[in-house]
Amino acid sequence: MAFLAGRTQAKVPGSAVSASGPDAVSAFVGSDHATCPASSGAREAATHGLPFTPASPVDQRRAVTLLFLPGPIHTPTPVLTEDLLGLPGFSVGLFSPTIGKYSPVQMMLDISQGSRAASSLYRPVAPPAPGLIVDGHAEVARVKGWSRLIDRAEAAPANLQPGLLGCSLEGTDVFTAWVGARGAPVTTAIAAMAGGDSVRRAKVVSPDRLAASIERVQENFGVVVAELPPGGFGLGAIRRIAAHQPQRMLIVVQAPPNPARTRLLSIGVRGLGGDGGIKSASTRRDGLVASTDIAATILQRVGTRRPRSMQGRPIEPAHRLDAKQLRAMSARFELIAARRAPFGKDVLVLFLLVLLAVTLLGRLTGRRREMTARVQRLVGLSLLWLPAMLLVAAALRPSRQTEVDIAVFGSLGLALATDRFVRWPRAPWLPVCSVMTLQAIDFALLGSRFTGQSLLGSNPLYGARFFGAGNEIETVLTLSALLACGAFMCDRAGVRPARAFAAVGAAMAIFLGSGRLGADVGGVVMVAAGFGTAALYVARVKLTVGRLALLAALPVAALALIALLDAVTGGESHLTRTFQDANGPGDILTVVFRRFRSSVQGAQAGGVWAIVLVAFGMLIWGWVKRERLLAPLVGPGEDAAARRPYRAALSGGVAATVIGALANDSGPAIMIIGTIYLGTGVLYLRGRPDSDKLVEGSG
C-alpha cells in the first residue's frame, strides 16, 4: 500500500502530506469522527500550532515502546525470530496477526483496538487504504480516511473500536507518540491513534536520526510507536534504544509485510522476566500470542484498566521455545491450512476405493447383501473413529500422504475390529468413548496442543481459536456423543434412557463448556438442545407450551452452570469472558445477535449457502422419511421400546444441528458437519446384519 511518510504537498491517499499553521493543526484534534475526547493539553498545543509535550518526564517502569521491525516478505518461515532471540533480555515467540485473510492495515487496526473479527465479516472485506498527513511544525498527524475505517468497524457484527488503545489512555497521565522514518511505510501510525483521527505527537525524521528521536520522545511519552529500518540497522537501533532506557518495556513486532499471505509473525518482549518465552490467556500456547494481546499488554504496563470490549489479554512469561521449535509450530499450522481441502478429497477417494473393493468382493463370492450391509456399518464406524486418528496424526506430524493413510486405514481397521467384537446396533459407543478420552487428555493435560494441530481442529493460523473445541470438533463430539448414548442403551434392561441422556448431556456440557476443557459456549447450547430433545423424545413426553419453554431454558441453565464452574475452578472460557465483559443483559443479547448475524454472513460467502441449503434439505427429507430410513432398527419380534434410544439420539442430533447452527458464528459449518454425522448414524443403522444372531463379544 502507498502509505509513506514524506513532505510532499500533493494530497494523495496513502501518503503523508505536510501542512502548517494553526488552522491546519486544529483539524487534527477533535474531528467529527472522534472515538474519544482529546486531552486539554493536546487541544491547547494544537490551538497555538506547537508540538504537544507532557509536563513532566514519565516513569520508565510504567512505559512501553512498540517497535515494528520489517521481516522477510517471501520467506515461508518466521526467520526473524532468530534475530529476536539474539537480543538480550527478550522473551520471543510468534503472534497471530489477523482472523482469516491477512491484511497489513487490518493487522494494525486489530492492534489499535485490541479486538478483532473475521475479515469475511467486514464490508468491504479489505480495509480502505488510509493516508497520513503530518504537520512537521506542530509535530502532529492526522489519518485521512479514518472515518471510513470507523464506519466499517461499526457495521461489522462485533464490538470493534479502532484506536481503542490510544483512546483508553486519554484522560490519564500517559500519552502516545509515533516516530517514523522519512520515505518508509507508516502503516504503524494506526497503532498510535489517540482521540478523533489524530496522532498527538508525530515525528518524521531521516533514518539515521530515527533511534535518537525515539530516545528523546521516550523521555516524556509513556507509549511510543515506531517503525524501524529492516536488517542489521533496525536490530542495532533496538539495542541502542534498549540500552538507553533499561527499565522500559520494549515490544518488537514484525512489521506487517505487504504483499503477504496469512501466516504467523515474530514478536519479542523485554520486561516480562521468566524463562524467555511468551504466552497469553488468549492462546494458552507457549510461544504464541495474538495481535490483540499487544494493546492489553501495553495498558497493563502503564497501569491503565483494560476496557471491557477489548478481547486481548496481557502477554505473560512462559517456557522458552527455540527458533527450531517456533518454526516447527508455524510450519504445522500452515500445513493444516494447505492440507484440509486436499485431505478431504483424498480421504473420500481412498474410502470409496476400499469400500468398492469390498462390495465387488461380495458380488464375486455371492454375498452381495452381506457385504453391502458391512460396508454401511464400516463407513459409519470409520467416521466415528476419524477424530481419534486425526489426533494421532497431529502428534506424529507425518507427510500428507501418510496422514491420509493413517486417517483412512486406521479408521477402517478400528471400524472393522469394532464391528467384529461389539454387536449391532451398540457399536458406536466404543469409538466415541475412545475419542472423548483422547480429547479430554488433550484438553485437560496438554492445553489443546494436538487438537489445534489436528486437521479437524480450529487451526490457530487463521486466529479464530487457539484452544479448546472449535466449531468443527464441537459438532462432531456432540453428534457422536448422542449416537453413542443412544446406541449403548439399546436392548439394555433396567436402564432409564431419559435420565441417561440428561446425565450424559450434563457431562458433555461441562466437557465442552468448561474453561479448563473445551471452553466453547456454542457447544453448551448444542449439547443442551440435543440431549434435552433426546430425553423428551425417549420419555414419550407430550410437548406443551410449558415443556417447550423448559427445553428452551435448558441452554440458559447450562450456560449459567458453566459460568459458575469457571468461577470456582479459575477457568476462562469464551463464555466466561462474555459474562465478565458484559455491562448487563443487553450486552449479552447483543453478542447473541452478532453471532447469529455472523453465521448468516458466513453462509452468504462464496457458494457456501448452496451447500447449506442442500444440508438443510437433507435434514427435512430425512425427517419426513424417518420411518422408512429407520425401519431396519426393529426387526420382527423385537421390542421397539428397547431400540427407541437410538431414534431419540437421531432426533436430538437434528435439534442440536439446527440450534447449534443458529447459536454459533460458524453456522454453515455446523449445519454441514451435523448433517454428515446424522447420515453416519443412519448409514450404520441400515447396515444391519442379515442374521439376527448377535456377534459374540463385549457389547
Image (cartoon, rainbow, N blue to C red):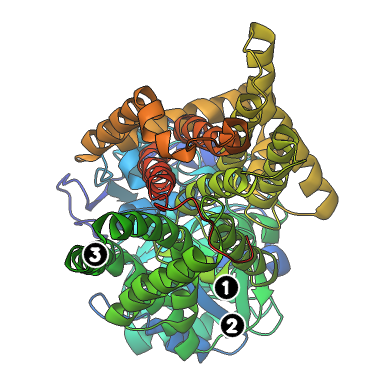
Instruction: Quadrant for the C terminus, please.
Output: bottom right
**Rendered position, 616 above or below 110:** above
Residue drawn at 45 percent across, 90 percent down? 324
- Of labels 1 and 2, earlier in sequence is 2
Going by the numbered disc 2, the residue's amino acid type is: Phe
Given the current orientation, which residue lies at the most extreme right position? 568
Name which quarter of the figure residue 145 lies in.
Answer: top left
Q: Which residue is mark 2?
A: 90
- The location of residue 444, given as percent across then percent down, is 69, 65
Note whether residue 155 is visible. no
Sequence-wise first label, 3 or 1 = 1
Relative placement, left or right, of 138 versus 608 is: right
Sequence-wise, the earlier of marks 2 and 3 is: 2
Q: Residues within 10 Å of mark 3 (few under 14, many from 20)?
A: some
| Disc 1 + disc 2, Cβ < 8 Å | yes
Give percent across and percent down for residue 36.
Answer: 54, 34
Amino acid on which disc 1 is placed: Leu
Q: Nearer the viewer, residue 398 or 32?
A: 398
Specify few, some or many for label 1: CA neighbours under 10 Å numbering under 14, 14-19, or 20 or more: many
**Above or below for 292 versus 180:** above
* Residue 358 or residue 283, whichever sits in front: 358
- Marks 1/2: CA distance? 9 Å
What residue is shown at x 50% (from left), y 39% (from top)? 195
Q: Is 516 displayed left or right of 29 in the figure?
A: right
Task: Classify mark 3: helix, strand or loop.
Answer: helix
Tell me the kind of residue under disc 3: Gly
Locate residue 542, reporting x and y percent: 64, 13
